[in-house]
Image: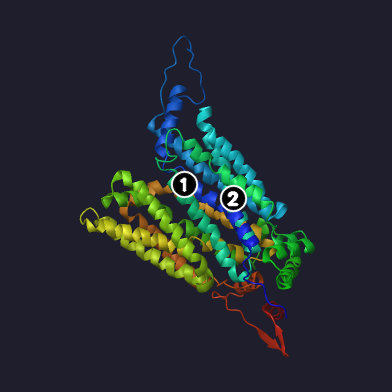
Amino acid sequence: MPESTDGRVTLMLVLSTAVAVVGNSLLYGYNIGVLNTPAPIIRQFYQDIYYDRGGNPLNVSTQPVNGTAFKKEGLTTAQLELLWSVTVSIFVAFGMIGAFVSGKIADVFGRRGGCMLVSVVMIIASVLGGLTKVAMAPEMLIAHRAVVGIHNGCSISLASLYLAEISPKSIRGAIGTCHQLAITVGILLAQIFGLRELMGTELLWPVLVGFQGIPCVISLVLFFFCPESPRFLLLKKKDEEGARKALVTLRGTENVEEDMEEMRTEGKQAMAQPAFSAKMLLTSPELRMPLIIAVLLQVAQQWSGINAVFYYSEFIFTGAGVAKSAIPYAIVGTGTINVITTIISVPLMEKAGRRPLLIWPMCVMAISMLVLTISLNLQAKVNAMAYVSIICMHTYVVGFALGLGPIPFIVVSELFRQAPRSTAMSVALVFQWMCNFVLALCFRFLQEAAGPYTFVVFIVILVASILFIFFFVPETKNKTFEEIAQSVSMGRARGKSRTVNLGGSSKDEVELMDSAKA
């Protein structure tokens, strides 16, 4: 029997992974943080523009009305807050739309083709954002954020699918973690570029916003040299020769029969079922548990409190005596810890497995939040508690970066067979964006109502998520997509596969299930 090529890392696999995450995942992270640092400058730009317009965005004329000179007024505090909230939240609202249509794009244009298509969308968005100040039009920045949301909603689904389907199963988790690593790098880049010494200035903030067109152009060009997902070619397009060529390119060897046979087996299972729509996915009893797992992991990721920790970071650093001018650099340091820990998680993904890296780091997160809540309440009375708060914030970030940050994207792409995979990814990410939107909308009110006890809500969510993962989420490390699907459908949370010998021959779990049904 020829030697297995599973686990082979080739230059083309590295290139394809890098191109996918730079043009998609990195930009998602970049857009999470790009407006944070220059927010006061952009808000002042809004105020200046609407003052010049006379304070009426629907009537830009400054000519006398009925013989009376039009009085110029700026935006009120409430109007400015509303306009800025729209600018920030429209990204999330249109991200939900992008996530919803991403499955259709993935199935029609392919995983690579879809990534290339949405790269063009991002280039258009970058032009809109970059020219906002030249055009003196805040509406262009709002339109920019809307188009960026569509790109990011599509791209994180497309990139996750592409990475999962080009990777050998023994390193699929490590390759998938590159998606989250690129997100953390994107957040860090936004934090660094947003410093006043770089692009966080009155003159250069449009460059900060429009910068993301550069990685998109690079990604778009390099994608021409990368293969399409072999699984898409074989199982969606029925192009066996194209799938084989793509595998040979990715694996660096002609010996790809094992991968081809695995995909054929998956294809036979898919042929027994019609094409999956969102309605069929939601109503299929067989896919109910995988879908619940996929959705709840995304909910746990968004409602784990990571955004709250970053929101509180300025308050925590101030309480510890960090100079106000140095706080942006301290926040960049926190982002750096996030990136370094995510890098560490790449090899751990295939050694420790998905379940342990979800459960134990989430326990660290919950404990860190509990101690952080206590220290925040004591910080005004005991100065040393400020330093305890900083330590807790960093241990929490480390826990998130090891598990709940990267793994939900990986597990969602692994839980489903080829037929429902793209639709399932789309549905799961719609829930992710919905949770993101709800948190963005409600967090200020939660923070004002609960104060230093805000984290108690997130502790409860973390504990509930840990229990759910322990009882229901299977281990997917080093398993084929078919084995994972069988494991979930048979209700084994730990995902232990079985082989049953009947009459001296090996029968897999599909046959065992069929015989049970009969």
Observer-nearest residue: 136 or 198?
A: 198
Distance of label 2 from label 1 (alpha carbons):
15 Å
Up-down relation of residue 85 to residue 176 (above or below): above
Observer-nearest residue: 256 or 45?
A: 256
Residue at 68% x, 87% y: name it.
Answer: 501
Q: Which mark is residue 190?
A: 1
Observer-nearest residue: 296 or 425?
A: 425
Observer-nearest residue: 143 or 177?
A: 177
Inspect this view and state whether residue 347 appears: yes
The percent position of residue 179, horizontal first and vertical second, equals 55, 58
Residue at 38% x, 47% y: name it.
Answer: 445
The residue under label 1 is which amino acid type?
A: Ala
Sequence order check, earlier mark of 2 and 1: 2
The residue where tag 2 is placed is: 23
Q: Secondary structure at mark 1?
A: helix
Q: Total number of numbered labels?
A: 2
Up-down relation of residue 409 to residue 42 (above or below): below
